Image: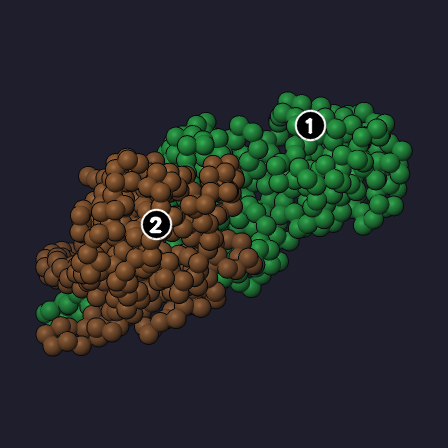
Chain colours: A brown, B green
Amino acid sequence: MKPGIRSLRIAQVAPLFESCPPQLYGGTERIVSYLTEELVKEGHQVTLFASGDSITEARLIPCVKTAIRLNPAIKIECIYSMLMFEKVLQMEDQFDIIHFHTDFLSFGLFRHLASKCITTIHGRCDIEDLPLVYAEYKDMKIVSISDNQRIPLLGIANFYATVYHGIPPLRFSLTPFNGGYLAFLGRISPEKRPDRAIEIAQKAGIKLRIAAKVDKADQEYYDREIKPMIDGNPLVEFIGEINQEQKSDFLGNAIALAFPIDWPEPFGIVMIEAMSCGTPVIAYPHGSVREVIDDGISGILVESIEEAVAAVPRAAAMDRRLVRKTFDDRFSVPNMAKNYIQLYEKMLHAKKLEDSTKTSTLIEQILSAADGGALPMSAINSAIKQQAA
Amino acid sequence: MKPGIRSLRIAQVAPLFESCPPQLYGGTERIVSYLTEELVKEGHQVTLFASGDSITEARLIPCVKTAIRLNPAIKIECIYSMLMFEKVLQMEDQFDIIHFHTDFLSFGLFRHLASKCITTIHGRCDIEDLPLVYAEYKDMKIVSISDNQRIPLLGIANFYATVYHGIPPLRFSLTPFNGGYLAFLGRISPEKRPDRAIEIAQKAGIKLRIAAKVDKADQEYYDREIKPMIDGNPLVEFIGEINQEQKSDFLGNAIALAFPIDWPEPFGIVMIEAMSCGTPVIAYPHGSVREVIDDGISGILVESIEEAVAAVPRAAAMDRRLVRKTFDDRFSVPNMAKNYIQLYEKMLHAKKLEDSTKTSTLIEQILSAADGGALPMSAINSAIKQQAA
């Protein structure tokens, strides 16, 4: 524990689809894991509610034996989240702060504890059904992972802060020289626009390497749109899925990460992974991109294929140490943890004020009800209800 | 209101997948609708939480504009149940009884109101994940729709009663003579064993008429196993889906309903539909069958194809008025409603006793905490917690 910092009792509540950290994909569980381990390192008492195959220095409360996505025996997935929330609720007095990463699912059960609850929304917010639920639970505090992510729920959800994701500073290291190609990393899907990446490489006369998985849902798109652009194309190499070790070389040796997306990306972890290798990002400015990329410093924002083509030599000439420095300054895990701790402290301060007001009101009400001698159930209930309101 | 009966304030909470009553399929929503309308008829103050396209004489609280299954715009279905439960919770003091038909989904949010909550489980209970959730929420009272349905959760869930389903007495009428065929009605699926029904008809040398839908999930099974048994078979007629009006003729004119199932049927509404036409049921004794069918009176239980074949002439000779009478005595909607009302009254009686004990304990605790002059939040909280326990 650093001097002058008090240790907080923090619950981190993860989704149960992947373990923390995930064995394969799972952006949310990876971030929860980074945050959890960093909070432990900083001396906080952290309890992680997650799948039983998670690995952590925190106290682990296993809420399903193994990650749900890897367990075909599980038929009714929601049971496990429901039981997890119940466990959190039963232990709630052990925590100063309860930090959910499970969308809106906890809201109903934790409404009466709203002051010490915070929920980071990891996904996109532009789904038509969402405003209804965030409007109902306006008392539940939300963290967005970019300001842009908020837009569809602006004025509806109770946004408390934006905290950008971080990855560990030692995960990737600065690769000082590039290996002369553009990198495309992620899923093959229409909104990621691998077709644009291919077109950019083609017109720039430079090699593109694509490291991507093709989900079942996207197989048809790949076969119809992308495969024909790759087959027999000497400039494009499709290398399939890569693991975490391969990522470092793949991203680090690239001139730039091609990120020509066409959807409201809530954050885009791959951008900061590239930056942490010193590799700039050539990106279309959708979703979070303007917030994550410092144009001209850690990447180049483009609005057309032509601008992207023109950006390639500029990216090659960029100062890779400065790209890495931008990552260190803004997107490392200690940064993310620091931002969350500030948030937790702000919540605790607000809660303290609120509690003291509520307590005195409640005492007054109960004592005034008790004045007449009788203390009917209805009086107690209404006092409690008013306290909860 | 019948004399001597008091009017209860009852919430019926339906699933939102279909309207109440459903436009097409939807056994659960149909039963909720029957129960709701009957309770209104008997003079109770009923509030129905259901989809907005429901039709009811009760007060309707619409929780989604139209039934979810018919609304492709809805992406996150659980939001609507969640918001429905929130609405019920906010109105809870308007109800003496809250009757859920939504499996375990309400348990977390309504645990503190367990004494006035009851949940009818409409589906099968032999899914591996279920014991976990029913063990956790042992305080939530469950109604099974047959005793057999309980078996996988026996000693785990808090079964309070079995209430058999009912259908309106005027929905179908006694068809005094049969039209010389066996009827198979329902979904084409392996566990319903249409293959057995065909074999029985074949060996009995009698016509089988199949009125059934083929779901997407069962198309392969139909094409591979059933279609070849039907094609060119002069004894088997496949007439596809039929509507409610056609059902009366289809069931009423049959010698017997063939019900050669191979799964733990929780109830089997089609059996009582047949009975209400005076048509006996030739059934394999799985799941609820032994409870629903009075062997030799409203149907014949068989354990093999041979026994089923032998049962056909016996069924043809059965007293169809007696079959109908068995329905009237046991499976009409007024019967079902009467059973539920008895249950509600029993709950209210238990709750009254419980409340009076809890109130005096709570008063003692709070007054003893107030004795010292100060009434700290922790004392109030612990008193409230103990009350909830």
The residue that appears at 47% across and 58% down in the rendered structure is: A68
Q: Quadrant of residue B292?
A: top right
Amino acid type, label 1: Gly
Q: Secondary structure at mark 2?
A: strand
Residue B3 point in image, percent of width and height: 46, 35
Query: Which quarter of the picture shows residue A176?
Result: bottom left
Q: Position of residue A194 (x, y in %)?
A: 40, 42
In the rendered structure, the answer to whether residue B348 lies left or right of residue A135 reads: right
Q: Which mark is residue B263?
A: none
Dot 2 amino acid type: Leu
Report in which chain the residue with disc 2 lies. A
Q: Which mark is residue A182?
A: 2
Left or right of A248 on screen, residue B33: right
Note whether B112 is above or below A152 in the view shown.
below
Residue A108 sits above or below residue B135 on the image: above
Q: What residue sits right under mark 1 in the picture?
A: B240
